[in-house]
Amino acid sequence: MDLLSLDLLGNALVSGLLLGAFYAAVTIGVSISFGMLDIVNIAHPAFIILGSYTAYIANTALGVDPILASIVLLPAFYLLGMAIYTIYDLAFERRGDASIRGLAFFFGLLFITEVALVLVFGVDYRLVEAPYIGPSLTLGPVDLPLRLLVPALVSLGLIGGLQLFMRHSFTGRAIQAVAQDPLALRLMAANPTRIKRIAFGLSIATASVAGAVLIVIQPVEPSIARDYIGRVFAICVMGGLGSFGGTIAAAMALGVVESLTSTFSGPSWSPAVAFGFLLLTLALRPAGLFGRS
């Protein structure tokens, strides 16, 4: 392998790892809702795009950094998630209709959110401005685009904060246990419905930050949410349901595979090879990388 190919390989690996960190942020909300609560929220990518557009509005109208705006808006997305779960619980979960009708409910949310964004913003691509979107850091032969590096660091910080909350707070431990043993939670004076409401609120809150880092990395338009539905659930399952570490590992692996394929075989092959890699991994280890065999 010549020197040029080694440089390409190094840059592709670094870009893939940075892209993987972003994929982890996109998926972490699904790891909570699907991996811990058994709620198949296929509308989650739509809330990520909603996060992108709120960051876009704050950036273009007020000149606020998009990532900073997403952090400020975390409470609003958290309350939105709690409200959605309350409706879902009353209409479907308590009636035992959460499987099919609940899935239709989230599909409807996906469709409504996309249509609303189209009506308000149209189908044109939107982008934001920030000091770190253009420049790159150069470390020898490897370039680190700040538009990937900054979102990657923010994404890992988000997941790290959630992991600390899950491990070191009573509510976090209750969230991890609620899908496994709700009776035990009641014996500990914890209301499973309340715990699920908090957990689902957290899952939607992550969409605020994930949406901001998405629009920093690339321009967005409302229908782009569909591109992430299969990807986020595949990463969630591949990493092991409810495992934050597994989510990061699976997302990094997917990012590297996509980047290598795009660099050496062309972008058109990237999605096919990446999903082939996911399917192969799940075939060899159905429980996921960090799941129980």
Image: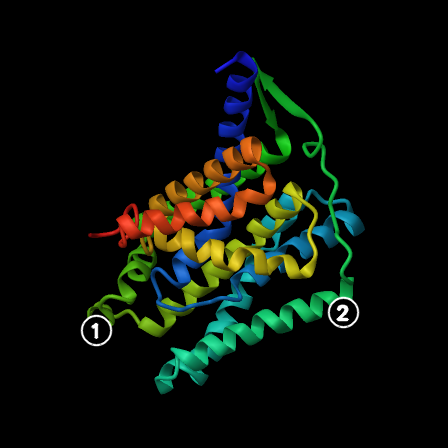
> Which circle's residue, 2 or 1, is located before the other in the chain?
2
Position of residue 111 measured from the top left corner of the image (x, y, whole percent)? 61, 72
Q: Is residue 159 above or below residue 177?
A: above
Indicate the amino acid at tag 2: Leu
For the point 47% across and 63% down, the residue is 201
Can residue 153 be seen in the rendering of this structure? no
Camera-side mark, 2 or 1: 2
For the point 24% across and 68% down, the residue is 185
Tally of numbered discs: 2
Q: Are marks 2 and 1 in contact (CB under 8 Å)?
A: no
Question: Label 2 neighbourhood size at 10 Å, few (<14), some (14-19), many (20+)?
Answer: few
Q: Is residue 42 above or below residue 219?
A: below
Question: Label 1 neighbourhood size at 10 Å, few (<14), some (14-19), many (20+)?
Answer: few
Residue marked by disc 2? 119
Position of residue 277 measured from the top left corner of the image (x, y, whole percent)? 40, 45
Name the mark on residue 250: none
Left or right of 18? Residue 126 is: right
Residue marked by disc 1? 183
Instruction: Give the structural element (helix, strand or loop) at label 2.
Output: helix
Q: Is residue 264 above or below residue 6?
A: below
Indicate the amino acid at tag 1: Leu
